[in-house]
Image (cartoon, rainbow, N blue to C red):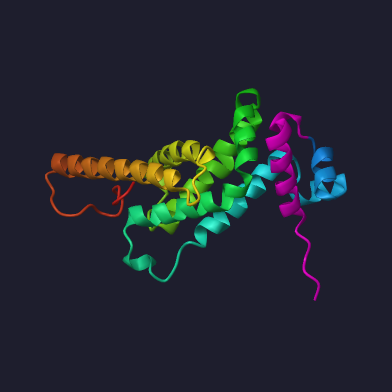
Amino acid sequence: MPRKRDDAGKCIQAAMTLAGLSGWRNVSLYDIAEEAGLEVGEVVAAVGSRHGVIREMARRADAAMLAAVDEDWRDEGVRDRLFALLMARFDHLRPHREGLRAVLTSLPADPLGALTLAAEPGMRSMKLALEAAGVSSGGPLGRMRARALALAYGDAFRTFLDDDSDDLSRTMSALDRRLKRLENLAERFSRSRFGRSGRTGRPESDTLPDAV
């Protein structure tokens, strides 16, 4: 049986290559089609639009992130789980780093692109990471957790864009620091809540867990 053609993957690779060479704002659907060896209609069918390239890339990064969950997951702490999930995401995005840098550079002049990254795949990905780590992302507290994790991820992402180490050691170090900071904040938050209520013991499920 012939292997199914991955037009969306071709579009992502082409778009990121072109963005790295000439800037994201200068990349058109026609340019993507030419670089990918596709018709413009095939590009539209595969990703819909330029911003659809970002959505599809985020979806694939989510899948790579979730694939980090393994048989040892039950024995890992929340912070270690989040670290593994987000590093799997960075590993997946590594081949597209130059293009991603160009996309981020264009955001001040591209409000829709900023919204696409932040409101759509961005927060969705952070909620998925929390859920995969065993942390609820529902309700007001879940939204707060997702925002806090997004800040930590964003800080590490800036390091990732300039990390030329073979093993992404700088990115790993930056992410570890951010997650430890969230863990410390979460512990202080839990202690203050239980101190005010006069209760003792471990937090219930609606409080911040080990990491966020």
Please provide percent x and percent y for residue 209. 30, 51
Please provide percent x and percent y for residue 40. 86, 44
Q: Is residue 10 magenta?
A: yes
Task: Characterize the magenta stretch by its predominant secondary structure.
Answer: helix
Q: Is residue 139 magenta?
A: no
Please state if 39 lies on the left or on the right of 73 as rendered: right
Which residue lies at the image location 44% right of the left edge and 44% below the top edge?
A: 171
Task: Say which quadrant the N terminus sits in.
Answer: bottom right
Please state if 110 lies on the left or on the right of 35 as rendered: left
Please provide percent x and percent y for residue 135. 37, 54
Which span is picked out in magenta? 1-27
Q: For the view shown, which residue lies furthest in the bottom direction?
A: 1
Q: For the view shown, which residue lies furthest in the top direction?
A: 109
Which residue lies at the image location 80% right of the left edge and 50% below the top edge?
A: 45
Please state if 73 lies on the left or on the right of 15 as rendered: left
Which residue lies at the image location 59% right of the left edge and 32% below the top edge?
A: 104
Can residue 145 be seen from the camera position used here?
no
Which residue lies at the image location 32% right of the left edge and 67% below the top edge?
A: 75
Please provide percent x and percent y for residue 123. 51, 42
Give the quarter of the image for residue 202: bottom left
Q: Nearer the viewer, residue 137 or 173?
A: 173
Q: How many callouts does the rendering have?
A: 0
